[in-house]
Image (cartoon, rainbow, N blue to C red):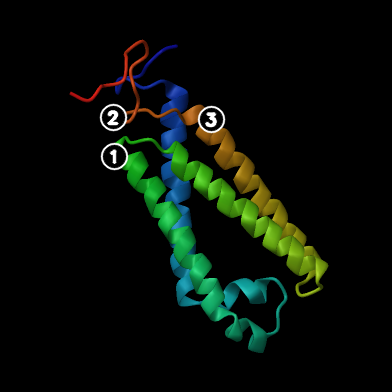
Amino acid sequence: MRRNASGQEPSRNRGRVGAGLVGALRVGLGLAMAVRPEIVPRALGVDAVSARRMGWAVRMCAVRDAALGAGGVYAALTGTDVRPWLVAQACSDAGDAAAAGLALRDRQVSPVRAVALMVFALLGMVWGLGTARGAGAGGRGERAVGREPPTAL
């Protein structure tokens, strides 16, 4: 496989850039949700009073998304393995889809909006897993092919 000037395969470099961009988007969305937590439940059709009462729970998710995004950005910028961050983000997205599905089942949210959120979250999950598969460890975190791992003295 061809390598670029940085010594990485082009698909791995694209994966690293994608992980960094998605990570930055997650940080931004997490911060927005932390500042205005009522946005998410209101977007799902929850009434204003209930949305305000859910603020603490939304902030927990906001911090989680911002932290996962920051980890992905850090890994992309430092050349460390982005795959664990992408897999963690995909798991988070799967959890969001499941939570929206349960809220839909219990008729707590707008059906159309919940399905839209579920589709968006599942697409994020699939993208994250696919990117993780193609990203490789890259940079400093990757072991050279054919070398034995270091042993303790």
Residue 12 sits above or below residue 144 on the image: below
- Which element carries disc 3, helix, strand or loop? helix
Q: Measuring 68% from the left and 63% from the top, which residue is drawn there?
A: 99
Task: Name the residue carrying label 3.
Answer: 133
Q: Is residue 33 visible to the viewer in this orientation of the structure?
A: no
Label 2 environment density (alpha carbons within 10 Å; few <14, some 14–19, many ≥20): few
Helix or strand or loop: what does disc 1 sit on? helix
**Which quadrant holds residue 108?**
bottom right
| Corner quadrant of residue 117 | bottom right
User: Which mark is on residue 143?
Assistant: none
Q: Amino acid at mark 1?
A: Thr
Residue marked by disc 2: 140
Residue in view at x 71 percent, y 56 percent: 118
Of the pair 15 and 93, the residue shown nearer to us? 93
**Disc 2 and disc 3: Cα gap in Å?**
18 Å
Q: Is label 2 in contact with label 1 (beta carbons under 8 Å)?
A: yes
In the rendered structure, which disc, 1 or 3, sits on the residue that comes first in sequence?
1
Q: Separation of disc 2 and disc 1 at Cα?
A: 9 Å
Foreground tag (2 vs 1): 2
Name the side, left or right, on which 108 lies relative to 39: right
- Residue 49 x %, y %: 65, 89
Report helix, strand or loop for mark 2: loop
For residue 78, the mark is: 1
User: Left of 115 or right of it: where is 84?
Assistant: left
Give the residue drawn at x 43%, y 23%.
10
